[in-house]
Amino acid sequence: MFGRDENVVPLDADRRRLAWVYLSRVVQGPCPALSALIEQVGVVEAARAVRECALPESLRRPTEKRRETDCAQADLDLVTHLGGRVITPDDPEWPAWRLLALSRLDPGRDADAAPPLVLWARGPLSLLEATEQAIAVVGARCSSGYGERVTGEIVGDLVDRHWTIVSGAAFGIDGTAHRTALACGGTTVAVLACGVDRPYPAQHDRLLSEIADTGLVISEYPPASPAHKHHFLARNRLVAALADGVLVVEAGLRSGARNTVKWARRLGRPALAVPGPVTAASSVGCHRMIREGEALLVTKAEEVLAEAGPLRLPLPTPTPLTPEESTIYEALPKSGSHQPTDLATRTGLPLPTIRATLPALELAGLIACDSSGWHRIEGDPR
Amino acid sequence: MFGRDENVVPLDADRRRLAWVYLSRVVQGPCPALSALIEQVGVVEAARAVRECALPESLRRPTEKRRETDCAQADLDLVTHLGGRVITPDDPEWPAWRLLALSRLDPGRDADAAPPLVLWARGPLSLLEATEQAIAVVGARCSSGYGERVTGEIVGDLVDRHWTIVSGAAFGIDGTAHRTALACGGTTVAVLACGVDRPYPAQHDRLLSEIADTGLVISEYPPASPAHKHHFLARNRLVAALADGVLVVEAGLRSGARNTVKWARRLGRPALAVPGPVTAASSVGCHRMIREGEALLVTKAEEVLAEAGPLRLPLPTPTPLTPEESTIYEALPKSGSHQPTDLATRTGLPLPTIRATLPALELAGLIACDSSGWHRIEGDPR
C-alpha cells in the first residue's frame, strides 16, 4: 500500500507520486529495466509488480534488496521538512526533453543508461526553467590558480548572457563555477551523488546552502542517502543531460570530468575543454581529451556558446513527420513562441503528447526552445 | 650560351647545372608553368626556350624581367666562394621524395605550388640525409618564456631520438628551435627567404653561421637575394615539405606559422600545435588552429612522433602495382633496407626510375625510409 493509512485511497496524482518515490528508493539510481517496465505498464502498475515481485528475471536482482521497504511517504515528509521537494516525470518542472536522450541510449552498453525516476530538489527555481539554457562546467578537484581564473572568466561571461551553470559541487573547478555564478547573480544547479540534505563534500556545506537559496540542489538519490562511489558516475550523466554542453576547465589524467564528457558525447551534447600550459598536470586530461577528439578546444565563453547554444544535436536524415508532429509544428507561430500548455490548448492534444513530441521535433532540427518557449527554426537549421 | 667561354662546350652535367641555375634566377622562386615545361622538354631545352622567348603565353610574364640576364656561372662562383653549393634535381642529395608532393599540387589553387628549381646550400651535410627524418618546429616571433621552455624540451627530446629540426631562423620559436638543436648536438636545417649569404634577421648572423658549421642553411633564392615579403610564404612551403611534420609551439593570431601549417596539410604532412594558457596572446594562434581542425594538439615529443614518424600520408585505395613498382618492392628484403643505388644494381632499373618509383610505393603505404635506407612495411600499414 502506498499511503500511511491503508483505508484512505490517495488521489491518482498522489498515488503516482508515491509510486515514483517508492520505485526510486528500491533501485537507488538508474535502472534501464525498471524504466522499460514503467514505460510499458505505467508507474503505478510497475510499483505494484515490484512490490509483489511479479517481475521478469531482469528486474528481480535490482529490486530484491529494498523491494519490501516502502518509505515513500516518509521520504516525502522528510524532504518537505527540509524545505525541498521531489520532482517526478508527472510534474511540470520535469525537464523531459533534456532527459529524453537518456531514454534513447542502449542500456546494453551502460547499466546507467536510463533517465532518473525522480529528482529530489532544494531551491526556489523550476528545474525546467533553470535548465532551459545551461552549460555544465566541471573539472579537476586539484585545480590551479590558472584554472580558477579561467573558470571565473568564462562562467562570469556565461552568467552575463543568462546561462545557468550546472556542476557537481566538488572541490576545485566545480566549486569555483558555482561560486562565480552566485557571485555574478546567476543561476546555478548543483547535482549531487548523495541526498540533497547531505553536504558533500562537508566543507561545501555553506556553498550548497547558498546554491539552494537562489538556484537548485538536486539529486536522484533520496534524502539521507550517502554518496556511494558508483553514484558519482551516474550523477555525471545528469550533469551532462541537464546542460546544452559540458565544459571541462582543468582535468588531471584520471579526472572524473572525462566521464562527464563521455556522457555528453553519448547524449549528443558538445564536449568542450580549455587548454592550459603543457607543463601543468592539471591540464593533462583536457589536452588528452582534445587530442583524442573527445572534446573540442575552447578558450572563452563565445566559443562555448558557438558550440553549445542553441543545442546542436546531430540532425538525422529527414523522415516524414507523424500527424501529431505536423499538428504541433503547424501550431507554432512563424515568429514568437509557445509553452507546451499553450500548444495543448491550441492543438487539442493532451499535454503528455505535446511534451513527448516537442523533443522529437527538436531532434529533427525543426524547432528549438528558449526562455520564452518553443519556436520554429527558420530556413535550413544546418 | 651557358658557359663563360662560348667556344667551350660544357659537359652535359655542367650544362644542366647551368640551365637549372639560370632558370632559377629568372623566375626567383616557385613557378608551376616553368616546372611543367622542364618536365616536358628537359631543363636544357627549357632554358633555351626561355632565353629565346620561344614560350607559351603563360611563361612570358614570369620570365620577362630577367630572361635576358644570365649570371649562372657568376652565381655558382659566388656560392663556391662563400663555401656553399647549389643542389639541383640532378644531384644525389636532392630530396626528391620530399619535394614530390609539391609537384602534385594544383597550381590553379596556389601560384607557389611547385617544387624549387634548385636549392642553394651552406653546410657540411647532405640535404637528403639531413632531412631523412625531420620535424619542422616553427612559431611566434614574439615568443614567451613558456614557449621557449616547451620548444627546448620538445626539440631536445627529438634531437635525442636523432630527428633533424627544420625551421626558418626567425626570432622567437624558430631561433630557440635551432639553438636547442645545436646545443644538444643535433642536426638543424634553416630555410631562408633570402640568399644563404645574407644573415636574416641580421641579429641571427652568428646563429646562421653556427647552423652552417654543422647543419645546413638553404634557400631557393640565389646568393645576395634580399628577403622579399612574398618569399616568406614560398619559403614556408619548403619548411613543410622538408619535414615529416610541422610543429607550431606558439603562434599569435596572425602568425606566419599558420601558413606553414597550411602547406603541411596540403602536402599531407601532419600539422601539430602546442597549447598554452588561454590567457596568453602567444598561444591564440595555436588554439585557433587546433579548434578549427587545422592542427592536432600535442604536448610532448612522443606525441609529435606518434603523428609524424614514420611519415603518415593518407593511404589511397589500393591500386595494382606497375611492373617497376613490383620489381622494386620485391627487391627490398623482408628485413633490413636498401639505398636507391643498391636497388638500381639489384633490379637493373635506371637510378632515376628507382628514385621516381620509391615515393609512389611509400605513398601506397608499402615501404618507408629511415636512416639506413628504404624498407618494407610489414603487415597492414594502417
Image (spheres, coloured by chain):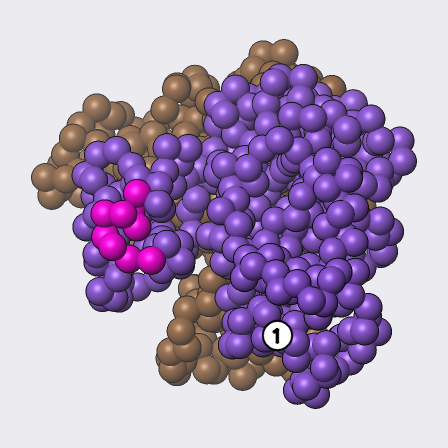
Chain colours: A brown, B purple
Q: Residue at left 66%, top 80%?
A: B49
- Magenta span has B347? yes
**Is residue A139 toward the left or the right of residue B210 in the image?**
left
Q: Quadrant of residue B208?
A: top right
Q: Quadrant of the N terminus of chain B?
A: bottom right
Helix, strand or loop for disc 1: helix
Q: Residue at left 42%, top 52%?
A: B313
- Magenta span has B71? no
The front one of B360 and A58 is: B360
Task: Establish if A259 lies above or below A360.
Answer: above
Q: Which residues are magenta?
A: B342-350
The location of residue A146, given as percent across then percent down, is 73, 24
Report crowding for label 1: few under 14, some 14 to 19, many 20 or more residues within 10 A (C-alpha). Answer: many
Farthest top residue? A203
The location of residue A357, given as percent across then percent down, is 44, 68
Task: Establish if B202 lies above or below A179.
Answer: below
The front one of A75 and B279 is: B279
Residue A74 visible? The answer is: no
The location of residue A181, given as percent across then percent down, is 74, 35
Q: Residue at left 78%, top 65%?
A: B70
The location of residue B204, given as percent across then percent down, is 84, 31
Q: Quadrant of residue A54?
A: top left
The front one of B225 and A13 is: B225
Q: Quadrant of residue B82?
A: top right
For mark 1, what is the residue?
A: B46
Farthest right residue? B202
Q: Main secondary structure of the magenta part?
A: helix
Q: Chain of mark 1?
A: B
Q: Residue at left 40%, top 73%?
A: A317
**How many circles with numbers are drawn on the protein?**
1
Q: Identity of the amino acid at label 1?
A: Ala
